[in-house]
Image (spheres, rainbow, N blue to C red):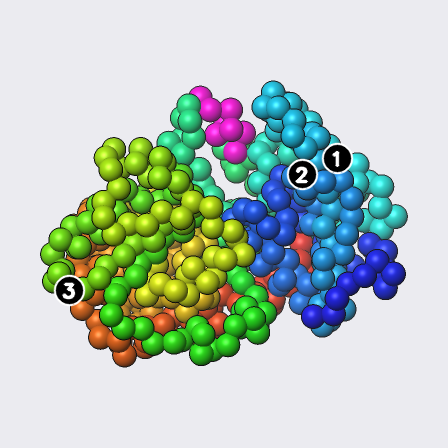
Amino acid sequence: MPQPSRSESPPLGSRPWVAYVGPFTFPWGQAASRRVAGVADSILATGRDVAVISGSERVGTRLLAVRASDARLWVVGAPDVPMGSDGVARQVAQHVTAAQKTVEFLAAQSVAPSHVVVYGGGISYALRILRWARSADVAVLADVVEWYSPRQFRGGIASPAFVSAHLALRGAYPRFDGVIAISEYLSNRYRSLPTAVVPPTVDMTGLMAGRSAREHLRPRSGALTLCYFGRPGRKDLLATIIDGFEIAAARIRHHTILRLRVAGPDEREVTELLGRDIPPGVDILPDLPQGEIGEFLAAADFSVLLRPRATYSRAGFPTKFVESLANATPVIANITSDLHRYLVDGVNGLVITGTAPEDVATAIERAASLPTDERQRLRQAALRTAVESFDSSAYVTAVDDLLSRTSE
């Protein structure tokens, strides 16, 4: 990829461009960051520039990348509150002044974007962007990745954050011009609008260029290493995964070394989730840098993912699943969202048939019984699925079609 520099970069708006806006960090730091990067790559491949306008980055505009098509990826910091502000200021920004700085930046450009894509931010954010877009005759799209449940929020249905997100999903986004949906479930929710279904995506070409196929597909023998990564929140059943691991470890023959490596939560958080001490064989890595996640995954035989049967797990799509396959690590998971389209039992992973610890234990025992060459075959299939189904290039046509339809 050509290395950008300020001297060689034309001003923003010198070619058709799309603004991708929201209160997320970019290009690193959150699942939102990775989601936006993936969709932005698909937009760049259409020949349009993309400016990611972040409410969580410091003020300023910088060029991040220049693609082969000469399309450019910019990041613009437009925080509504200064960095380090207290909780009160952040609450005011979320519900009162949300997107104000973003709108000021958009309004100041000599050439308006063809589209604004909104990711997150709640009802105040959505309505402020929508008002500006209508006044500027700019199409506005929502990138929708969740259908929230009150149980995901502290305070439940009375949580201001839940109310704000709920109103955005049901009240504001249906007034937009189109939707980029992370799942078929969400696409169906907005079927009255033009939509494109885009699951979590990655730049597989760039990822593979950074590691040789030999490193990805090296055979493994001896110990069975499992992993879980990320913040479980109220989505992932990490406690059940650990309970199932403990059951399996007790039943597997003593000479089989079994490990579960957990990256994300610290020991205190895991202990609170379990309501007891962390069992032997479970290693906690709370401070793993984002840049080391790939190596963490590649060093495991399987990643493990378990989510409850709920509306929000039908609506969302686990980024963890895609990242695991992209690093040639097959997944042990139950079927939620659109995973039935991609996870094939015994081919690129193993399916957990229920959500109880015993169900997890059964799947882990199956994994432990696989010979080395079979594990290797699953690794190869996992990587192949990532290349075929989750590379950002696979969704260029769908994204281009949505942008074209909504700009008419």
Q: Which residue has dot 3 on it?
A: 255
Q: Earlier in the sequence, mark 1 or mark 3?
A: 1
Mark 3 vs mark 2: in front: 3
| 139 and 207: which is toward the camera | 207
- Label at residue 55: 2
- Other-residue count near label 1 (Cα within 10 Å), few / some / many at <14 / 14–19 / ≥20: some
Q: Earlier in the sequence, mark 3 or mark 2?
A: 2
- Residue located at (70% from left, 45% from top): 53
Task: Say which element carries label 1.
Answer: helix
Q: Earlier in the sequence, mark 2 or mark 1?
A: 2
State if disc 2 and disc 3 touch (CB < 8 Å): no
Whole-number angstrom distance, CA of label 1 to CA of label 3: 60 Å
- The magenta stretch is 158-165
Q: Which residue has dot 1 on it?
A: 101
All told, the count of numbered labels is: 3
Task: Say which element carries label 3.
Answer: loop
Q: Is residue 199 visible?
A: no
| 350 and 279: which is toward the camera | 279
Task: Say which element carries label 2.
Answer: loop
| 300 and 167: which is toward the camera | 300
Coordinates of residue 9 in the picture (x, y in percent):
84, 61
